[in-house]
Image (tube, rainbow, N blue to C red):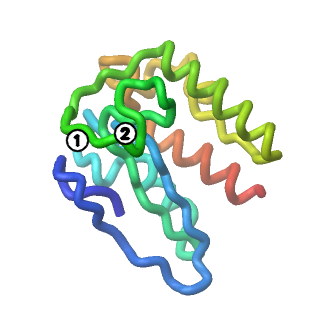
Amino acid sequence: MGYLGWTWIPVGRIPKKGQTRVACVGDSITYGALIRNWYRWNYPHQLQLILGSKYCVHNYGMSDRTGMETGNHPYGKEGNEYSFGIRLSEIKEECVTLKELAEQYSLPVIDIYTFTEGHPEWFCRDGIHPNAEGNRKIAEYIGNRLLAS
């Protein structure tokens, strides 16, 4: 589950029949960048531990990626840059866009940004990437929301 080093080669389990599939799509935050043993402490891996065997969670986090077409490296466009060019204004813009899209299609939203706002102790020194504790808190929050639905 996740990626093998910085090579972006997906590794992970194959979903078993009857498992609910969870795709964690995102950027370096989803990937688990800047934390020691990222493959163990990224929130998608922690989420798998919380959800258990009825779920199959995959980490599709890629550094410097965004869902916004106007972002620095939108999903769907090729690029070879592996920097952490995340800007707070883009995060807020993505939150608004995702909430509007979810409302349009009557989908629930799990807002990690609002959940983590005001908790600087959950982040690495850059203030953007969650540390191990932050990843655990994010996984717990997502897991509780998924199990409650």
Percent from the top left, x then y, of residue 111?
64, 34
Instruction: Report crowding for label 1: few under 14, some 14 to 19, many 20 or more residues within 10 A (C-alpha).
Output: few
Task: Identify residue for label 2.
Answer: 132
Q: Residue furthest top?
A: 89
Residue at 53 percent of width and 75 percent of height: 53
Q: Nearer the viewer, residue 82 or 4?
A: 82
> Tag on residue 63?
none
Task: Identify residue for label 1.
Answer: 36
Would residue 129 appear left or right of 17 to someone viewing this image? left
* Cβ–Cβ under 8 Å for marks 1 and 2: yes
Percent from the top left, x then y, of residue 11?
28, 66
Q: Nearer the viewer, residue 78 or 138?
A: 78
Image: 80 above or below 9? above
Residue at 64 percent of width and 28 percent of height: 97
Would residue 135 appear left or right of 22 to someone viewing this image? left
Q: What's under tag 1, amino acid-wise?
A: Arg
Q: Quadrant of residue 2?
A: bottom left
Q: Quadrant of residue 116?
A: top right
Quadrant location of the N terminus in the rendered image: bottom left
